[in-house]
């Protein structure tokens, strides 16, 4: 059997004048997590819907386990599970009824349906809530049930569209644990996310997309290495000093400095490592700038994203950025211009 379980080649999709996907290529290996990282409106859900046979591409092709998602759509559906940001569970049914419904949709026999539902409830710590209506569930429980529903038929390929967006930190970490277990059991996962820390933690390989185009790909480390070294980061004590600090050290860096005015923070790609740090310290001292903090660190995925796109990935809570509003089909960050 092929070891490439998901293969996308030259996929394009437009909605009217909005080019959601402008020729995307990617591949996911068996029993690995491919992270599709991009901000709101980048085209992640559009690609997910094409892979899940819910939307036709305008151009290009996509295959799952060697099967074409357009020509062989009927054969693709039973081998993929889909779970997402908007839990697709029925509020008025109980957790168990939701799972059994999915099992029947996949034409599993009655005893098999019951057994799989019990297994999923157990696995996602929902046994106690199994016979309660879903409308009584917390957000984290719904998301667990939604993920569970995508697993009832035991699909070898799982597509997770922003599975932790909107979850509290504890539920996020719990969801990460479930995802890691699934991969360890051999499931191939395409995981879309706007969280850099999530991609960093879960994805074996990361494809970064922005405005419907792949702008980088590789392992997390490879992406960080693209910056070619370390990053000098400083925070000024008084925000008014930020421009002065920028002027003092800009030419020392090996790339465009990034300024975060809200936090009085400045970062500078620094291939020279400690030498660049020392030079920066001297210049800042000569310019009489009082610092809160000055350090040399390894690039984060956010630095990579910034360097590639000139803007932040958007929802990396760990970096203190403003969270973006939740995406929906009509509410991408891009207009239709
Ligand atoms: N059904 C649709 N009709 C019109 N525009 C759409 C539709 N779905 C998505 N878009 C637009 O396509 C772009 C990509 O959206 P989407 O794939 O949802 O991005 P993401 O999931 O990365 O946030 C956005 O500009 C969005 O507004
Ligand atoms: Mg989306």
Image: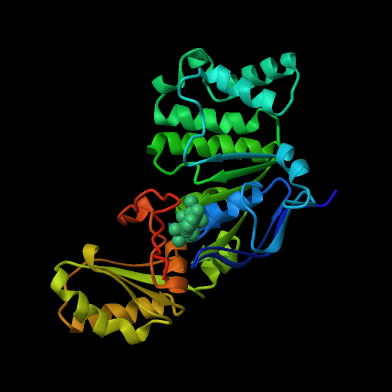
Count of labels in the image: 0
Looking at the picture, tell me which residue is in the foreground, 330 or 135.
Answer: 330
Colour pattern of the rendering: rainbow
Residue 294 shown left or right of residue 238 in the figure? right
Q: Residue furthest right?
A: 1
Quarter placement of the C terminus: bottom left
Question: Residue at image x 57%, y 34%?
Answer: 178
Q: Is residue 271 above or below residue 52?
A: below
Considering only vertical position in the picture, is 93 above or below 201? above
**x and y, in percent, of residue 162 in the image:** 49, 46
Q: Position of residue 221 (x, y in %)?
A: 56, 62
In this view, the residue in front, 8 or 225, is 8
The x, y position of residue 124, in whole percent, is 55, 25
Residue 245 sits above or below residue 235 on the image: below
**Quick one: which residue is furthest to the front in this view?**
16
Can you give x and y, in whole percent of width and height, for residue 280 in the image?
30, 79
* Res 334 quadrant in image: bottom left
Residue at (46% x, 42% y) in the render: 164
Look at the image and tell me whether residue 38 can be seen: no
Q: Is residue 270 left or right of residue 6?
A: left
Could one spot residue 238 in this view of the protein?
yes
Question: In the image, 112: left or right of 138?
Answer: right
């Amino acid at each position: 059997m092929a070891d490439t379980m998901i293969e996308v080649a030259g996929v394009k999709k437009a909605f009217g004048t909005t080019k959601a996907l402008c020729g995307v290529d990617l591949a996911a290996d068996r029993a690995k997590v491919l992270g599709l990282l991009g901000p709101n409106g980048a085209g992640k859900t559009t690609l997910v819907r094409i892979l899940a046979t819910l939307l036709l591409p305008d151009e290009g092709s996509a295959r799952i386990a060697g099967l074409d998602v357009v020509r062989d759509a009927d054969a693709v559906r039973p081998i993929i599970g889909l779970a997402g940001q908007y839990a697709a569970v029925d509020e008025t049914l109980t957790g168990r009824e939701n799972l059994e419904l999915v099992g029947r949709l996949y034409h599993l026999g009655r005893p098999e349906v019951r057994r799989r539902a019990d297994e999923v409830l157990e696995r996602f710590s929902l046994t106690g809530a199994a016979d309660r209506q879903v409308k009584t569930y917390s957000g984290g429980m719904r998301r667990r049930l939604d993920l569970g529903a995508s697993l009832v038929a035991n699909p070898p390929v799982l597509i997770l569209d922003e599975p932790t967006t909107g979850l509290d930190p504890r539920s996020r970490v719990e969801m990460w644990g479930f995802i890691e277990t699934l991969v360890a059991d051999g499931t191939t996962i395409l995981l879309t996310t706007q969280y850099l820390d999530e991609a960093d933690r879960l994805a074996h390989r990361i494809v970064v997309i922005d405005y419907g185009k792949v702008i980088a790909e590789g392992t997390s480390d490879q992406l960080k290495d693209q910056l070619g070294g370390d990053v000098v980061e400083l925070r000024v004590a008084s925000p008014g000093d930020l421009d002065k600090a920028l002027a003092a050290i800009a030419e020392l860096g090996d790339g465009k400095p990034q300024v975060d005015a809200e936090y009085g923070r400045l970062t500078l790609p620094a291939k020279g490592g400690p030498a660049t740090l020392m030079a920066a310290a001297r210049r800042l001292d000569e310019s009489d700038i009082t610092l809160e903090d000055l350090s040399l660190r390894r690039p984060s995925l956010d630095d990579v994203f910034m360097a590639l796109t000139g803007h932040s990935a958007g929802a990396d809570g760990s970096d203190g950025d403003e969270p973006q509003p939740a995406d929906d089909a009509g509410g991408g960050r891009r207009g239709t211009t």
